[in-house]
Image (cartoon, rainbow, N blue to C red):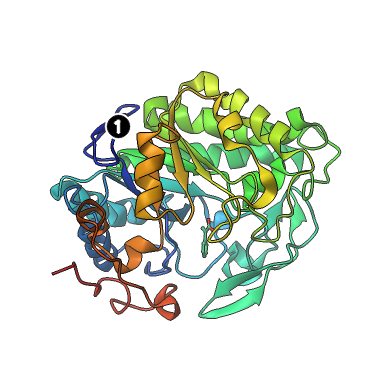
Amino acid sequence: MPSLFDPFQLGDIELATRVVMAPLTRNRATGCVPNALMAEYYAQRADPATGAGLIISEATQISPQGQGYSDTPGVHTREQVAGWRLVTDAVHARGGRIVCQLWHVGRISHVDVQPGGAAPVSSTARAAESKTWIRGELVPCSTPRALRADEIPGIVADYAHAARCAMDAGFDGVEVHAANGYLIDQFLRDSINDRTDEWGGSVENRTRLLAEVVQAVAREAGPGRTGVRLSPANPGNGAPLDSTAQATYGRALERIAPLKLAFLHVIEGQTRGDRAFGGFDYARLRTAFDGAWMLNNCYDRALALQTVAQGAADLVAFGRPFIGNPDLGHRLRQDLPWADSDRSLYYGGGAHGYTDYLAAA
Ligand code: 8OZ
């Protein structure tokens, strides 16, 4: 039986264990540029003997327009590539592996973080009933404008450029963030996408952006170094569920499966909540895909061990537990208790609540 602590060949990436650090937004970049403090934070969690077998970076915007929150990092300029190089070098020096999560927020944004104060873009011109985090305050998302069809190839090109930048920065691969009500999900779901052109309406049209983005990204990073994150039943970020979610996400996966991607990363149910929410059948989704299967959402030790032993997943991603436990891998192995983390220090700030959590004695 496979174990959570066994090595794993993730496409072209060799992992020492199947313990994954999930992407965690922490808003500590300097003007969207990764810095030495971030390198220290990731390095603390990078040694597979004590931390993660794989780190997925915090969500990272592919373009200025892809930003939705203050102080999130980008991966589209030379300066950002140099900043990320601090991070990837520090992770690799500990024997770790790290992929970059590529992110366009779409309408989960605010004019204050958009180039020239412009409206954010989406599949729709309807605002998300949600909030974003701007300079320490939660504020309502700005009303977006619907992308013109002739702008969409430019968005796909931005993803490809960002994937190239991520590989230039020394990442081991990339993950396309197609989950949690952000831009790609805004196209996938019929609850949001109200377009009447070739990017809306039918399942085929709504899954087209995902298919084109993943194809373009895999061309740059290599399919064996590319993963995708989906959350078919998460209503967060003002994203009511798709009316035929099983069919829509099934078709979405069927369209990208022939690319022979390294992995699919699935958030079960409602992010940070009920895994059963939405009644989605994830095992059925998996039948469309033969790459590695990574599951996430509030796993504890017992469930993670059982899930990998039974083959229900190849890897398990842990998010918040990695904030307060830089040595979560060690604590999982030794069955040690997990420390809590201070929610008030999750977003923004400096070292406090970020790099000052201690390893277990
Ligand atoms: C928490 C706060 C801000 C962003 C996601 C990128 O939910 C996020 C995110 C999470 O995928």
Q: Quadrant of the N terminus?
A: top left
Residue 275: % across, % down: 56, 52
Q: Nearer the viewer, residue 243 or 338?
A: 338
Taking the image as shown, residue 334 lies to the left or right of residue 241, namely left
- On the question of residue 140 being in view, the answer is yes
Residue occupied by mark 1? 2
> Quick one: which residue is furthest to the right in this view?
196
Residue 52: % across, % down: 27, 50
- On the question of residue 165 being in view, the answer is no
Residue 117: % across, % down: 64, 68
Q: Which residue is rendered at x = 20% and y = 47% of the image?
A: 48
Asked if the beta carbon under badge 1 is closer than 8 A to the nearest atom of ligand 1, the reply is no
Q: Residue 161, relative to residue 275: is it above or below? A: above
User: Which quadrant of the view contains residue 327?
Assistant: bottom left
Q: Nearer the viewer, residue 115 or 262?
A: 262
Q: Which residue is rendered at x = 38% and y = 26% of the image?
A: 224
User: Which quadrant of the view contains residue 28?
Assistant: bottom left
Q: Nearer the viewer, residue 21 or 205?
A: 21
Q: Quadrant of the C terminus?
A: bottom left
Q: Residue 267, relative to residue 212: is it above or below? A: below
Taking the image as shown, residue 299 lies to the left or right of residue 212, namely left
User: Which quadrant of the view contains residue 345?
Assistant: bottom left
Q: Residues within 10 Å of mark 1 (few under 14, many from 20)?
A: some
Q: Residue 253, relative to residue 358: is it above or below? A: above
Taking the image as shown, residue 126 lies to the left or right of residue 341, namely right
Instruction: Identify which amino acid the numbered label 1 is placed on.
Output: Pro
Q: Nearer the viewer, residue 305 or 142?
A: 305
